[in-house]
Amino acid sequence: MTRIRLAAPTVGARVLGLGSAQPEHVVTNDDLAKRVETDDAWIRSRVGIAERRIADEATSLPDMAVDAGHAALKDAGMEPAGLGAVIVATCTMPNPIPNAAAQVATRLGANGVPAFDLNAACAGFSYALGVAADMVRGGSVPNALVIGVEKLSDWMDWDDRSTSIIFADGAGAALIGPATEQDGVGVGPVSWGSSGDRSDAIRILGDTTNKLHQEGQAVFRWATTAVAPVALDAIERAGLTPADIDVLIPHQANLRIVEAIARKLRSKGARDDLVVADDIVHSGNTSSASIPLALDHMRTAGRVRSGDVLLLVGFGAGLSYAGQVVVCP
């Protein structure tokens, strides 16, 4: 009988480094009020956003991914030649072919490594993180660079008040490597799923406009009821309790949704001093980039420290959702 040799698995996976990148151009609520019927108070009360970053035409989605990837590699102290794989979570490439990941890998200096895109929209980073951790745990790759990146401005109808006030551009990255001892495991099991019966809630319109459309109220109702159970399941899969979580970093979809998730976790035992990400206030909704962007910004600001237990949970178009517990490097 022929025996196929398998790669040696490792005990687990951990985060080795983080990085992020955003365009320089800031668009305020007052700027948007010059084009659509809105104002700063209305936007803040509905979604909690004060400003967002929008890339210029010359800046591509891979450009932002490369910048974030370089930052994560530098943070981890790793040279590009040591990369094992590149996974780009995105839903806003201008064309389905070629993918972003192969371009990004080559531009980072890691030509020849496995590289692929993953589209789970706003849950994309958590999906990609789960895949990367399993690849490392299974011995398929020595490490993997996960990048969540979006250029949503390419798909916006800037005269649509329901979407133009929300979405923005940016990238965030995390380098995932092996944990050789149980005490060093830093990425917990993923809790994920989908609700394809609600796929029309967030979609690119199939007409000549090709613009993003969202059923805002339907998404809000779903997110404020369905996401907290996913977060709690991720905690249970990691063998922890809500009281063990130091920082909650949900997808930055809407500040009201973020606060609703935090309230439900506290009702289930999360601590009163649980730190909750609010990066949406100054970054807007950057879809698959929002979780790593928020994490990197919070770490830079000192709101997240090495060793903190983080709960990440993404949710969005598909509808797709995923979450996991992660230890901050």
Image: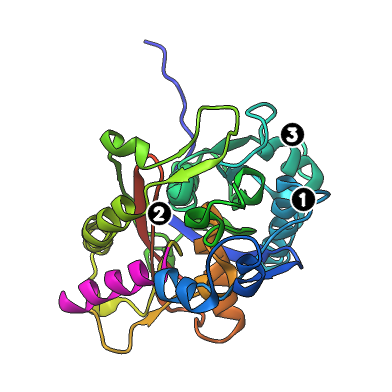
| Residue 257 on the magenta span | yes
Magenta part of the chain = 254-269
Q: How many marks?
A: 3
Mark 2, Cα crowd under 10 Å, few <14 / some 14-19 / many 20+, is some
Q: Which amino acid does label 2 sit on?
A: Val
The residue labelled by disc 3 is 112
Q: Distance between the residues labelled 3 and 2?
A: 27 Å
Whether residues under marks 1 and 2 lie with C-beta atoms below 8 angstroms apart, the answer is no
Horizontally, residue 105 falls left or right of residue 241, namely right
Whether residues under marks 3 and 2 lie with C-beta atoms below 8 angstroms apart, the answer is no
**Residue 88 location (% of width, % of height):** 60, 44
Mark 1, Cα crowd under 10 Å, few <14 / some 14-19 / many 20+, is some
Secondary structure state at the residue bearing disc 1: helix
Q: Report the mark closest to the observer, 3 or 2.
A: 3
Horizontally, residue 103 falls left or right of residue 6, namely right
Mark seen at residue 11 = 2
Horizontally, residue 328 falls left or right of residue 190, namely right
Whether residues under marks 3 and 1 lie with C-beta atoms below 8 angstroms apart, the answer is no
**Residue 298 location (% of width, % of height):** 54, 78
Secondary structure state at the residue bearing disc 3: loop
Main SS of residues in magenta: helix
Mark 3, Cα crowd under 10 Å, few <14 / some 14-19 / many 20+, is few
> Relative to 90, is 52 above or below?
below
The residue labelled by disc 1 is 63
Mark closest to the chain's N terminus, 3 or 2: 2
Residue found 56% across the figure and 56% down from its top: 164
Q: Which residue lies furthest to the left in this view?
A: 268
**Residue 192 location (% of width, % of height):** 31, 47
**Residue 147 location (% of width, % of height):** 60, 52
Q: What residue type is labelled 3?
A: Gly
